[in-house]
Image: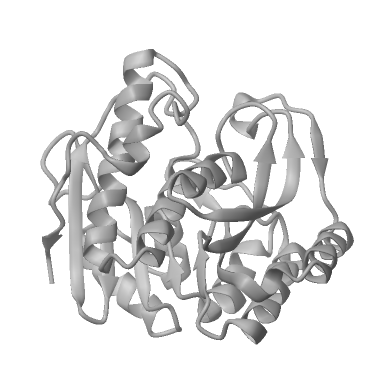
Amino acid sequence: MPHLLSLQSHVAYGHVGNRAAVFPLQRHGFDVTAIHTVQFSNHTGYGAFTGDVFSPAHLMDVLNGIEARGALKHMQALLTGYLGDERTGDVALEALTRIRRHQPDALYCCDPVMGDTGRGFFVKPGLPEWIRDHAIARASIITPNQFELGFLADRTIASRGDALAAAADLRAKGPKQVIVTSLDVPELPEHHIAMLLDNEEGSWEVMTPKLHFDTPPNGAGDVTSALFLAHMLKGASPEQALAQTASSVFAIFEATFAAGERELQLIAAQDRLLTPPQLFRAERVR
């Protein structure tokens, strides 16, 4: 059974971080070893939460224990999301180093969680720069949202062309695949949003309807990164992985909207993670 490591946040209630990534990966047939950077009662968007941020020493201790069991020898990929600070990031890159000692071709999918449009940065000062200067160069795949893309490439993203130029800038630093998880630019039809993929072969875009939630659910980026990685590891082409991922994410959003819930309905609509009822096409844009 294919095996990978996911290192990101964890909540007891709801679906963000590892709680949004591990289950989709498992439904796709992957054995996931999860290291939690934090354990909170719920995601911070609720305003109130309880729990703890785990120290880098704690995370390294867990990583050492996993390695002692021989698990890192069989890892096909590393997935990272919310890290917390630079020292936690250093643990993530140490995990990657150890995995690649055994599996030199192991993928590293870096979801550069740091902020969002309208909200700004929500991580500790210094982490965005650390991700830009250290994690991006070692990643195989990066999955920024539009806000994160602009910061990482030091560009204003006001058009599809801006997004493509920014993605090309980032690919020049190392990643082979750049997926913009939520592109909202004037070229899109009204009430639509897009995912954009850029690699050396070209660029593709998948447009889906934009659902208007009173309170938009959190965790969509975490699900997106997990699903794209899953499809790539299962042998899909990047554009096929993009289409499947965007279609499943929309289907989960649709089920969440219909249920009138704030948390993503990953369990109730789990079959859509594998077989979305509507497949949106990836259209070539470069």
Q: Give the image location of residue 281, x and y in percent.
A: 13, 51
Name the quadrant of the C terminus: bottom left
Q: Give the image location of residue 73, x and y in percent.
A: 67, 76
Q: In this view, does 244 lie above or below 272?
A: below
Position of residue 104 in the picture relative to residue 198 (left or right): right
Write the residue at 50% across / 83% down: 105
Q: In this view, does 148 lie above or below 182?
A: below
Residue 116 visible in rendering: no
In-front residue for pair 120/23? 23
Way the structure is coloured: one colour
Position of residue 12 in the picture relative to residue 143 (left or right): right
Write the residue at 67% across / 41% down: 10
In-front residue for pair 23/138? 23
Q: Is residue 138 above or below residue 269?
A: below
Position of residue 253 in the picture relative to residue 280 (left or right): right
Write the residue at 78% across / 70% down: 67
Q: In this view, does 48 lie above or below 118?
A: above
